[in-house]
Image (cartoon, coloured by chain):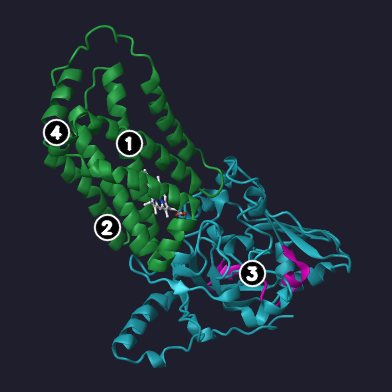
Amino acid sequence: MIEPLNTFVRKTPNWLLYLIGAAYPAWLLYAGLSGGLGVDPVKAMEHALGKAGLQVLIAVLLITPLRRFSKFNFLSWRRALGVIAFFYILLHFLVWMVLDVQILSQVWADIVKRPYIIVGMISLLILLPLAITSNNISIRKLGPRWRKLHKATYLAVALGGVHYIMQTKGFEYEPYIYLAVVIGLIAIRKLPKKRAAQPVKRQVA
Amino acid sequence: MAHRWTNDLTHDDVTPKSAYLNRRQLMAGMAGLGLTALAPKANAAADLTPTDFDVISQYNNFYEFGTGKEDPAKHAHRLTTQPWSIKIDGMVDRPGDYALGDILSKMTIEERIYRFRCVEAWSMVVPWNGFELKDLLDLAGVQSSAKYVAFETLYRPDEMIGQKSPFLDWPYVEGLRLDEANHPLTLMATGLYGKDMPKQNGAPIRLVVPWKYGFKSIKSIVRITLTDKEPPTSWNKSIPGEYGFYSNVNPEVDHPRWSQASERPIGGGFFAKRIPTLKFNGYETEVANLYDGMDLRKNY
Ligand code: HEM
């Protein structure tokens, strides 16, 4: 079961992942225009994109522990998933700016004044260079610095989780579950590597 | 005593419920012909077309039924509203349980077309049906020592499934100063668009205070208490730094989460333009004097 799945993952062409990724916002736009998102499609789309962005980012962070603690290997999806998540969050931001707040002076006032927006903005700004360097040329040029840079994903996702909690009004469980998962994923990284002494067994990559 | 206050929106602004969709098309048609001047004259400050019934009844903050805007419309059918009575107690001459039917038999129901402004910076225009709160308070006989009115929503987690979550400290409570409660704009609403109040909008009876943010307009009321102390209010208890007792609509005083300078009218789809928010939600001439000499920044 594991091997065929890993083969399937490895063989999925990137363009297909991007196509599926793009289908979601396209569907949201269609649904919003045709009444499928309820009477306030702007908020519905804003929330759906923020949520989807966070979910896909968490999926990206799951890839490493899955490889470590099971035989599942989704590594070859990671770049596409990361880029897709970034675009969801960029669209989340653009929907907020263009369709929700609309007025540029108010957009700016919100960015400097509202704590939950500031946290979201910092997260997006951290993700920006990661998205820009998600290509082979950057990996080659940056060498070991690329890995270091891309560890910032953890910080960006954690801030996304905090932003999610901050934007709720009363008490809700759901955002805390997300943040707990993110914190758990960060904690797992700190677990001592049992087989550190042995040469790392490489899966056929 | 009904009809102390008259709408600045006339009855013509609300079309019979069966025809309101047609009317929209008609308006659009008139606009196309450059005949908008013939459309019913709305308030000068804004074009006040009542929001569609479907929008008013499908986009609700009624956390007793869940946190999503569509949750109340989905879950409120569980609520049983009969029998219903309101316990009126505290500093009144005639405390007791007032059956809703008995109350209504003594009231004149009138229509009030009000702007409705949520603290989340969205807005609607709602044609409410109801009677003035003052008439109900008169029924119970407010004593001269009373200074505030406290309200309480039904607490029945089996039917109000949102109450099973600790989202807020249930039951929901709200309050008004007595002069605010006695103001002719302050309405006890029992319906909208000439229909019984939809359950998701606060059936069978709710408060409507049009110059305050929507959360002040407490729904499904079971208790009204006259007191001489400022009563606790749910959102203030939950996040005191964000929600005060007064919560008057005020574009000059921002909420920490939302700029209050403008609002998004709901029902206009993806590209609905924001409109400027009016001080006291457009009821400044009627209510500003209630707050003479008060610092509205401090008393937010
Ligand atoms: C550019 C910066 C950002 C801005 C301006 C922004 C703005 C917003 C706004 C306005 C809301 C809705 C609040 C409300 O309706 O009251 C929201 C919700 C949300 N945002 Fe962001 N955001 C930003 C960045 C992010 C990032 C980086 C993430 C994730 C990594 C994220 C994830 C979410 C989530 C999960 C929600 C909640 C959605 C839901 O309730 O289902 N946002 N954001």
The verdict on residue B178 being magenta is yes
Q: Is label 4 or label 1 in front?
A: 4
Label 2, residues with CA under 10 Å away: few <14, some 14-19, many ≥20: some
Quick check: A81 left or right of A140? right
Could you tell me how far apart the alpha carbons at marks 4 and 1 are, in whole angstroms? 19 Å
Give the SS element for disc 3: loop
Comes first in the chain, label 4 or label 2: 2
* Residue placed under numbered mark 3 in the picture: B209
Between residues B296 and B189, which one lies in front from this camera angle? B296
Residue A1 visible from this viewpoint: no
Disc 1: which chain? A
Residue B144, image x and y in percent? 88, 69
Quick check: B138 left or right of B274? right
Residue A153 tag number: 1
Could you tell me how far apart the alpha carbons at marks 4 and 2 are, in whole angstroms? 37 Å
Give the SS element for disc 1: helix
Give the residue type that dot 1 points to: Thr
Disc 4: which chain? A
Give the residue type that dot 3 points to: Val
Residue A140 tag number: 4
Q: Colour of chain B?
A: cyan
Label 1, residues with CA under 10 Å away: few <14, some 14-19, many ≥20: many
Marks 2 and 3 share the same chain: no
Marks 3 and 4 share the same chain: no
